[in-house]
Image: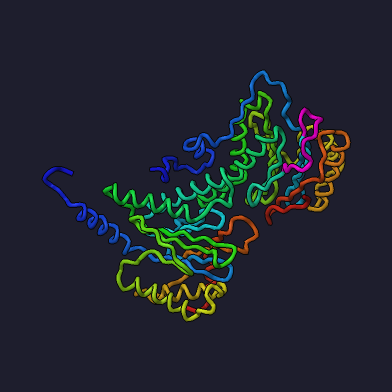
Amino acid sequence: MGFLKNYTESSFFGLLKTEYPELIPQIMPHPEIKQNLVSSTTIAAVKYKDGVVIGGDRRATVNGHIVINEHVVKVFKTDDHSAIAIAGTFGPSVKMAKLFQVELEHYEKIEGIPLTLEGKANRLSQLIEQNFPAAIQGLPVMPLYAGYDLDAGHGKIFEYDITGGTFIKPKEEPFSTSGSGGDRAASTMEHFYRDDMNESEAMELMIKALDFAAKKDAATGGTSYIIKSVSRDGVKSLVG
Amino acid sequence: MEIGNFISPKKLIEIKRDIVEDALSRSNPILAMEYQNGILLIAENPSYSLHKVSEIFDNIAFAGTGVYNDYERLRKAGVQYADVKGFSYSREDVKAKSIASSYSDTLGEIFSRSNMPMEVEIMLAEVGETQEENRFYYITYSGGLIEEKYFSIIGDIYLDISTKKIEKNLLRNFLKNKNLTGSLNLKETFRLGIDALNSVRTGSKINAEILEAAVLDRKIPKNRKFNRFEKKEIIELIGDGK
């Protein structure tokens, strides 16, 4: 029967794989194509008293220096208590962010309760792992994921490598940066970070970090930034 | 079917109908009604976690009554259909009408082809940006698809008296407030729903413990307009008016 599917589990990605394989993003570059498709960028996340601020610039580049767009969006709300910032190849990254959003919503609707924050972060890790064959051919997806853990009562930041390896930022290093301007953003964070910051102070720090990155990194910039905060009250747009 | 035990198609359908209607006559009614900000859904359901009313997509809610595993399977299929459609086209392309017609196809097919039809009755409610764009679809166990206006009722309808009583009572109340159709606030609409349910109950009056309720509220400032009420919110809504 067409409407009733054999797939009865709670994962949207699983549903696509079983019932709609044609909808799964599967771009695979030719091994001999040497064009560097990775869009360099700066994205960052930093914890504050009541949650996490996550942000990024809006420039998309090819080969690291040809600007093709100044208005792209790299930070997305993924559900009521989490947001993702993407670095890597633009197309696959945006598709993965969208797939991840639906994955979380689908799970919540099928099961009647949302995943825990760890559960969400693990799902994202599995999606990134799926992309590994494309990643080693030059189409990586390397997001930062920030969420508010309602059970633990504080914000958390998750880093990923191209194999899907997950790393939860510890108390000692309450911020994370990624992309070609990431190093400069990280130095800024390291220098100015305070553990008693409120939301607007964390936002100021984020702007400062992105400004410093944009100054030296040609691939970072664009019209303005996109900055969101994730807290117990939900996901809020601060800039952009 | 063995030769020599021939049953005419007409008889076969009658047998299937009897099976389903018997099961459904023991199911509880579910109401969906328009109010100021959208659509309110109320179900009699003593369970805390086995829901009869739930979210399908942004502005579309599902209600099912009858045999749990049957309507649960249909609910999941609806969520899958909606999410795949929203993912591959856009969120705005997901419409209750196309989901309802898929339900209708599926139930019709199962009823005519299978020896064991699904013992369910289901409803889809869709809240629009204006009241005129609200939609109610009610799908019977044999695949009948009916569009309704202002409100919709499923479950318990084959107990001859209660059916008509529920429908009539609500209808009367709605007509009485004709100028207010859909203009009542949440609390008033809830009250009206409870009164309607009470009017057909033979036993004790309805209380919050056996109620499940949710809204599709167009004022919710995000895509997903579905909001399920906690038991304590239901108690608040019912107020102390016993």
Residue closest to the eye, B27 or A74: A74
The extreme left residue here reads B4
Residue closest to the eye, A22 or A194: A22
Q: Quadrant of the N terminus of chain B?
A: top left
The extreme bottom residue here reads B176
The extreme top residue here reads A32
Vertical order, A137 against A219 (above or below):
above
Vertical order, B239 against A218 (above or below):
below
Percent x, y of residue B150: 48, 69
Q: Would you identify the image quadrant in which residue A221 lies? A: top right
Q: Would you identify the image quadrant in which residue B120 lies? A: bottom left
Residue A105 among magenta residues: no
Vertical order, B20 against A4 (above or below):
below
Residue depicted at x 68% and y 54%: A234
Residue closest to the eye, B62 or B96: B96
Please indicate whether residue A179 sits to the left or right of residue B105 in the image. Answer: right
Residue B229 seen in this snapshot = no
Residue B219 seen in this snapshot = yes
Residue depicted at x 64% and y 21%: A30
Percent x, y of residue B223: 61, 55
Percent x, y of residue B106: 38, 49
Residue closest to the eye, A185 or B143: B143
Give the extent of the magenta segment.
Answer: A61-74
Percent x, y of residue B70: 37, 52
Q: Would you identify the image quadrant in which residue B23 lies? A: bottom left
